[in-house]
Image (spheres, grey):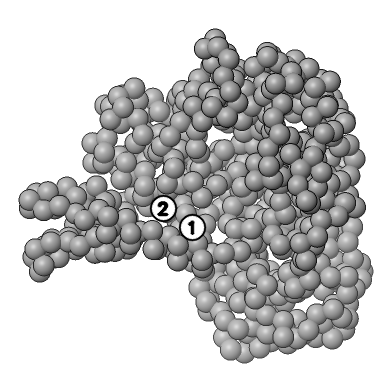
Amino acid sequence: MNARDLRKKYIDFFTSKGHVEIPSASIIPQNDPTTLFISAGMHPLVPYLLGQPHPFGQKLTDVQKCVRTGDIEAIGDTYHHTFFEMLGNWSLGDYFKTEMIPWSYQFLTKELNIDPKNLHVTCFEGDVDAPKDIESHDLWLNSGISEDHIHYLPKKDNWWGPAGNAGPCGPDTEMFVDTQPEAGPVEFETGCQQGRIIEIWNDVFMGYYKDETGKFSPNIQKNVDTGMGVERTTAILSGFKDNYLSDIWQPIIKKIEEISGKNYSDQNYTRAIRIIADHIKASVFIIADGVEPSNKEAGYVLRRLIRRSIRQGKILGIETNFIFNIAQAVLDNQDNYGGEYPSLNQNKDKILSLLEAEENKFRKTLDKGLAEINKLLGKNHSVSGKEAFTLYESFGFPVEMIQEELAKNNLTLNIDEFNQAKENHQKQSQTLSAGKFKSGLADNSEIITKFHTAAHLLHSALRKILGNHVGQAGSNITSERIRFDFTHPDKLTTDELKTIKDLVNAQIKLKLPVIVETMPFIESQKQGALAFFGNKYPEIVTVYTIGSKENYFSKEVCTGPHVENLSQLSQFEIIKEESAGSGKRRIYAVLK
């Protein structure tokens, strides 16, 4: 089964069960500023999982584009991917286990034709916070899974959330497929360790709420959240242990083989080819959703993906620009993405030009790195592990190339010292980023809600003072401050910043109400609601109006969260203004 057929089967199955298909959100979060990328199907649905009514109802399904950056170093094996598609369905306070588990069994065995004898499932074994999930066990048993294929596991394996210190959470039940039943019986744990028994789907039952004190209680709105990866499932259904052998990847891999003259089947080059295929496909989708290479946040991740691809190209013996051609293979992969994601074709020229420019820039950087190595060799007659890491981090100079240059001088690199410096840097980065990559379920706190509302006021004030060319170009909101990016060519003057600040505070003093409505997207545009993400919006949207419907200060398409009245906000202060790239500015602000 190919990816297109899998997507269609999944969506058709759940729409037949009363679900409404919703479009994939952008990879770049528009209303969850605590993460750089959408990494799961539930992320765009955070407000609705918390109780806000969804304009399409309580039963939803989609194919969501996702990017996960935590496993970049693991890319190169058979199953990790930076960009992937997640099939999902949700119940927002509608159905629960009684419906979901039989549906899961039906889809796996009837739609995907997986032999029930080859299925294993896991359930929560229970602890002091919640009882053993006997209900899920019995539902699987009654559906057709044999007793010896149902396994109880602890919270670390079969419990989801909360994403932060508090929020919705609950037990999950995971589904696995034995990919080598012909090899005879195998213990579940052994099969998983051998890579023979592979997870294919996960049903999360958010039936609990954990409060700030750590106490678990029944959740007011019981949600179901599921996730099935397209790449992994397609490979399993096609009989492949290696995801990269499926039709999702083969057109891209064939192009890499053609350019490099190396074969994927040659184990000396398999890992490098996988990394290039993965990273360039991810880069294409990230650029299509509005990100450009830079040294900050999402742009830095994009730059890192491109540069890692070029490094791997050197392993394959590619010394000239090639990223453009690999990206073209991704864009031409019509069997998988044609018609699925219009943003690819709409941004084709931009995608290709940005990738080519970035490759040119990095090749110059490599020349600088080589010059630095020669400088160190001339001065110290060696390169320490710490110095090598500085070259790696500052210039993106591959450690393999550093070793090659040292070998030319009959020197070796202290790789343990290099790895220690790298580990220290990663720990520091993780510490600095703590909280940055949490799901929005953890961050609809009172202060985040206030800051989010203030960001709408700032957006409107910027347009009123600077002009209607101003549009939101990104945001990041933490419990400490608001960061708001917007389109504007010039640095703001001191007077402009004061006028903008005063205008925001004037609205707060007026104690304006915040009105929330759902309506067709077309109607929202007729009413003047701001919306800068084009076809990323569904047919029905939520609109937040600050002021009265007839005389408003701000009206935007958004999913929240927001305060109910500006009287809940304190004084607004702008603490910094700076460039955010070509034609963009950035403001940092707080509520005092």
| The one of 273 and 583 positioned closer to us in this rendering | 273
Quarter holding the N terminus is: top right
From the top left corner, tell me how far across and down residue 437 is, in percent: 60, 58
Q: CA distance from mark 1 to mark 2?
A: 9 Å
Instruction: For mark 2, give the secondary structure.
Output: helix
Residue 274's place in the image compared with 35, above or below, is: above
The answer to whether residue 315 is visible is yes
Tag 1 residue: 299
Residue 67: % across, % down: 56, 46
In what quadrant of the picture does the C terminus appear?
bottom right
Looking at the picture, does residue 436 appear above or below residue 251?
A: below
Regarding mark 1 in the picture, which secondary structure is present there? helix
Closest to the observer: 488 or 86? 86
Residue under the image location 73 percent in, 69 percent down: 448
Give the x, y percent position of residue 514: 87, 69
Which residue is label 2 attached to? 304
Left or right side of 260 for 237: right
Horizontal side of 416 relative to 476 (left or right) equals left
